[in-house]
Image (cartoon, grey):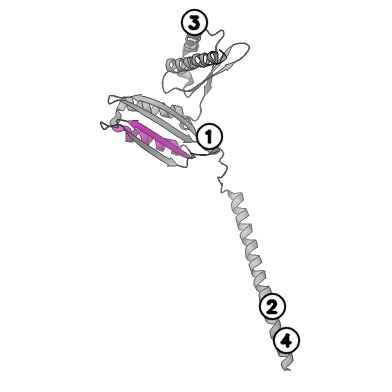
Amino acid sequence: MEEKKFVQFKKEEFAVKEYVKNSLGKGRISSVRIEYTPVGEKIIVATNKPGLVIGRRGERINELTSVLKKRFKLENPHIEILEIIKQEFDSQIIADEIAIALERLGSIKFKIIAYKTLQKIMSAGALGVEIRLSGKLPSERAKSWRFASGYLKKVGDTAKIVDKAQAVGKTIAGIVGVKVAILSPDKKIHDQIKVDDELKGKIKMRAIRLEEEIVEKEKEEKKEQEKPKRKRKIKEK
């Protein structure tokens, strides 16, 4: 019984998240997170366009709050807006943007859309990007295309730092699946070595010390070679 209740609870939570995303508009919402507090339900919406999401004097937020109370029977929902400053590093927004562009321009221009998006993300400073498009692009048979640039972790524990998302574009030819993976520059990679001025200085100091050690060893070797020659000269006298 408890398992059924848990599954039903997760279904209702998923329905709330999907409704919030669809009602606020595709391509504007990155993620929806629900936190349960003693006061009520706290719904955190991450978006790159907070003005459009909130509306004039918070009209859209008020409408959404009333719908959540009536339709989903939430006691006291409180919607909080979290602004995304660097949208180029948010994989969900990028995936939605690609899906919208495919719907507007068509699947024929999928390469232009993918390469422009790839260039925009890399020029913003991302360490690595991978875009996968699957569907009828534009042939009759479904095919998968991969567009990648930079460095991207795919296996191990460090692969968890890669931001991944997927979206669906409904074109005339058919449905196109979009998968995006982005490694932003603020992520810490354990095996990455940053070459800065401090490291360059340490390398120079180490090289100077090695040269000094080599010179000293050469001097010692010359002294050792000269010692038996002196003894021979003394004997000859």
* Residues at marks 2 and 3, CA–CA distance in whole angstroms: 96 Å
Find residue 119 and report its image quarter: top left
Q: Position of residue 50 (x, y in %)?
A: 49, 20
Frontmost of labels 3 and 1 is 1
Residue drawn at (45%, 15%), measured in percent from left and top? 19
* Residues at marks 1 and 4, CA–CA distance in whole angstroms: 72 Å
Residue 13 higher or lower than 119, as above or below:
above
Q: Which badge, 2 or 4, is on the more N-terminal residue? A: 2
- Circles 2 and 1: CB atoms closer than 8 Å: no
Q: Which residue is mark 2?
A: 224
Left or right position of 224 against 115 = right
Q: Farthest residue toward the left? A: 140
Residue type, numbered disc 2: Glu
Q: Which residue is mark 4?
A: 231
Residue type, numbered disc 3: Lys
Q: Which badge, 2 or 3, is on the more N-terminal residue? A: 3
Find residue 147 and report its image quarter: top left
Label 2: element kind: helix
Classed neighbour count for the residue bearing mark 4: other residues with Cα under 10 Å, few (<14), some (14–19), many (≥20): few
* Residues at marks 4 and 3, CA–CA distance in whole angstroms: 108 Å
- Circles 4 and 3: CB atoms closer than 8 Å: no
Frontmost of labels 2 and 1 is 1
Q: Which residue is mark 1?
A: 160
* Residues at marks 3 and 1, CA–CA distance in whole angstroms: 38 Å
- Circles 1 and 4: CB atoms closer than 8 Å: no
* Residues at marks 2 and 1, CA–CA distance in whole angstroms: 60 Å
Image quadrant containing the N terminus: top right
Q: Which badge, 4 or 3, is on the more N-terminal residue? A: 3
Q: Which badge, 3 or 1, is on the more N-terminal residue? A: 3
Q: Is residue 133 magenta?
A: yes
Left or right position of 223 against 113 = right
Label 1: element kind: helix
